[in-house]
Image (cartoon, rainbow, N blue to C red):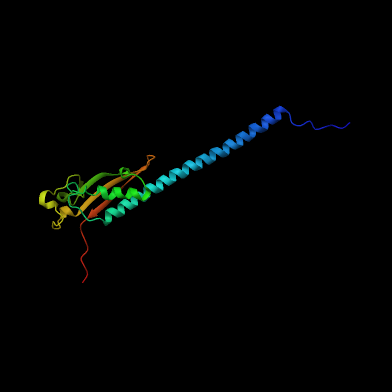
Amino acid sequence: MKRYDRGSSLIEVVIAVALMGIVVSGVLGAMWSAIRLSRFSDEQAKVEAVLGSAADRLANYAYIPCPTNNSNGGYLPIIQAAAGTVDWPTSSVTLTGMFFWNTTSVSSGTWITTNGLSGTECNETASLTTARTLQRITFMVTSPSGYSKSLEVVKSNVFPRSIS
């Protein structure tokens, strides 16, 4: 007698489908992790790009003796303009600190949060003094997803002498 192939039983089909489901869910889980990691890396790269752009803009902008008294808003609009490099709102860049070199304790190298200049000393044509030479500007960039990073830039109004 010949034996005929009767096909697969219901139990065999269920086991095969269950095994394929396990394999597919493992592959989908790995793909989802790769997508999330890619998005996070993209956010980090954009934050780094905005930080670099803001630092460049700050370095190339004129020194402001009293940035808190500046009618243009001090350095804030300069660094906030860097958010446009990745089409983020300007509010994603914030000025988190402004420090001035403490001239009374030069040997200890301390920074203070208050500028010793006021009134006519704050105009742009003020002569060079130790009090006006160093400012430490700290700013933070926050991505729309919440990743943030900060940077400190030291700015001075000390320029090299011209070579004749």
Say how many tags the image has: 0
Q: Give the residue at x 29% y 54%.
A: 57
Residue sitting at x 27%, y 57%: 60
Residue 119 drawn at (x, y percent): 11, 49
Residue 110 seen in the current view: no
Q: Is residue 155 above or below residue 16?
A: below
> In the visual, does 161 lie left or right of 40?
left
Within the image, what quadrant is residue 29 found in? top right
Outermost left residue: 120
Residue 59 visible in the picture: yes
User: Where does the image place residue 83, in percent across and percent down from the top left?
Assistant: 33, 48
Residue at the extreme right: 1
Name the quarter where the C terminus is drawn.
Answer: bottom left
Residue drawn where x is 64% and y is 33% of the image: 19
Q: 132 above or below 29?
A: below
> Residue at 57% of width from left, 39% of height from top?
27
Q: Horizontal placement of 20 versus 77: left or right?
A: right
Depth order, front residue of 22/54:
54
Q: Which residue occupies the foreground of this view, 94 or 162?
A: 94
Tell me where residue 12 appears, x and y as whole percent.
71, 30
Image quadrant where one finds the N terminus? top right
Residue projecting furthest to the bottom: 164
Relative to the observer, which residue lies in front, 99 or 23? 23
